[in-house]
Image (cartoon, rainbow, N blue to C red):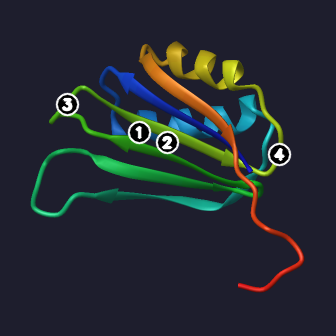
């Protein structure tokens, strides 16, 4: 599992988040999954979490606007992708990436849980 996590600064609307996740799927050459969903924090106007399924795994945006002008983006995929391509898409939305990590995770194979 290839994982990219980014902290960003800047404001982004719910519609822009949907557009961003669609653009990320295309840019990193993954395949749309069964859909996406947005969840808002109950009784608080502090942002939302948007999750988009891809056939290779998922993308998530944890948006803290208007509480904090920024948030987090996570891309998890069984397929290989170039983190710099994803960063370019994010920055094209006028968001500033302030920190990131790029890692690979492995589940054990051949055993039982």
Which residue position holds label 4?
Answer: 79
Residue plotted at (45% across, 21% down):
99
Earlier-in-chain disc, 4 versus 1: 1
Q: Which residue sits furthest right?
A: 110
Residue 43 lies in quadrant: bottom left
Residue plotted at (75% across, 64% down):
107
Query: Does dot 1 land on a helix, a strand or a loop?
Result: helix
For the residues bearing labels 4 and 3, Cβ distance under 8 angstroms: no
In three-dimensional space, the C-alpha distance between marks 4 and 3, rounded to whole angstroms, equals 32 Å
Which residue position holds label 1?
Answer: 15
Q: Nearer the viewer, mark 2 or mark 3?
A: 3
Quadrant of the image for the C terminus? bottom right
Residue 90: x %, y % from top left: 53, 22
Which residue position holds label 3?
Answer: 68
Depth check, front residue: 71 or 100: 100
Q: Is residue 1 above or below residue 33?
A: above
Q: Is residue 93 above or below residue 61?
A: above
Residue 59: x %, y % from top left: 58, 47
Q: Is residue 42 left or right of residue 56?
A: left
Residue 18: x %, y % from top left: 49, 42
Residue plotted at (68% across, 25% down):
83
Which residue position holds label 2?
Answer: 18
């Amino acid at each position: 599992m290839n994982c990219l996590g980014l902290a960003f600064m800047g404001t982004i609307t719910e519609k822009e988040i949907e557009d961003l996740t669609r653009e990320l799927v295309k840019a990193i050459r993954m395949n749309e999954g069964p859909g996406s969903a947005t969840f808002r924090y109950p009784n608080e106007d502090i942002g939302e979490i948007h999750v988009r399924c891809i056939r290779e795994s998922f993308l998530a945006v944890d948006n803290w606007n208007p509480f904090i002008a920024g948030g987090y983006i996570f891309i998890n995929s069984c397929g290989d992708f170039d983190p710099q391509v994803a960063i370019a898409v994010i920055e094209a939305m006028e968001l500033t990436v302030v920190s990131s990590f790029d890692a690979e995770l492995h589940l054990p194979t051949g055993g039982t849980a």
